[in-house]
């Protein structure tokens, strides 16, 4: 695939269109690429430290072993995108729109998806630590093989959300899980937390 793409040179700029570009091992510190469009691009071992990509659009693109630390991805759009082996830490992705996006074998630490719209999104074998889904709309989202530690679903809307096969460490928003599917083992593990949330006292 890389042979059909053009190697990136220079620096990212806001309001630009990047079509058929490969970003191989490129490091961006404090890059400003807000409102840019990335179409049919490939990121391999790239890194974004800080920076502003607000309202950028990623379409038909793949990111491998790419890192985002403290980056502003708010109001970004993602469609037909795969992120494999990527790490996101302290990322602001609130009000982002994601459609047919796959996160595979990644680590997401303190990523803010609040108010976002996630449709046909797959989290596969990922570690999500302190992920914020508050007020987000999740439609056909799955978390197979994932570990959710300190996840918050407060005021989220969940429709056909599949949590089966995930290790659930949910700290808020139990009432928003209506419309989600879990397995029997998860139900047993969640029962004490659900009882506490509903004010049910269990005594023997």
Image: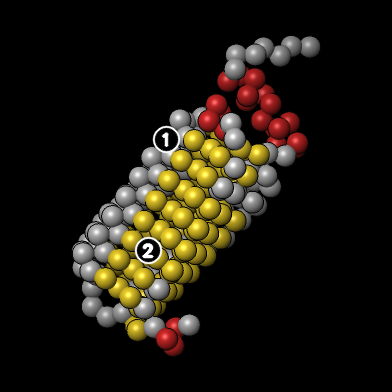
Q: Which secondary structure, mark 2?
A: strand
Does 183 sit above or below residue 82?
above
Residue at x-position 49% and y-position 58%: 101
The residue that disc 1 covers is: 135
**Residue 145 placement, left or right of 60:** right
Q: Residue at x 59, y 43 (%)?
A: 161
Instruction: Check disc 1: other Cα within 10 Å, few if <14, some if 14-19, many if 20+.
Output: many
Does the rendering let one see residue 127?
no
Front-lying residue, 7 or 51: 7
Label 1 with label 2: CB-CB less than 8 Å: no
Quadrant of image for the C terminus: top right
Q: Where does the image place residue 54, in percent across and percent down from the top left?
A: 27, 54
Total marks placed = 2
Residue 106 position (above or below residue 203): below
Residue matched to label 2: 58
Q: Residue lying furthest bottom in this view?
A: 3
Residue beneath the point at 75% across and 37% down:
185
Percent position of residue 67, x then y: 41, 62
């Amino acid at each position: 695939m890389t042979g059909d793409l053009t190697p990136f040179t220079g620096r990212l700029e806001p309001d630009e269109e990047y079509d058929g570009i490969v970003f191989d091992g490129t490091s961006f510190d404090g890059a400003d690429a807000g409102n840019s469009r990335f179409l049919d691009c490939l990121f391999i071992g790239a890194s974004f430290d800080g920076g502003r990509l607000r309202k950028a659009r990623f379409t038909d693109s793949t990111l491998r072993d790419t890192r985002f630390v403290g980056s502003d991805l708010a109001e970004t759009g993602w469609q037909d995108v795969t992120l494999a082996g990527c790490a996101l830490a302290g990322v602001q992705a609130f009000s982002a729109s994601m459609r047919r996006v796959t996160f595979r074998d990644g680590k997401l630490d303190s990523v803010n998806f609040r108010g976002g719209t996630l449709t046909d999104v797959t989290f596969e074998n990922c570690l999500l630590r302190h992920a914020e889904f508050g007020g987000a709309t999740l439609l056909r989202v799955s978390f197979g093989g994932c570990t959710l530690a300190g996840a918050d679903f407060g005021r989220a809307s969940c429709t056909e959300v599949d949590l089966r096969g995930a290790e659930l460490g949910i700290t808020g928003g139990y009432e928003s899980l209506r419309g989600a599917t879990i397995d029997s083992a998860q139900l047993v593990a969640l029962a004490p937390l659900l009882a506490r949330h509903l004010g049910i006292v269990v005594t023997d």
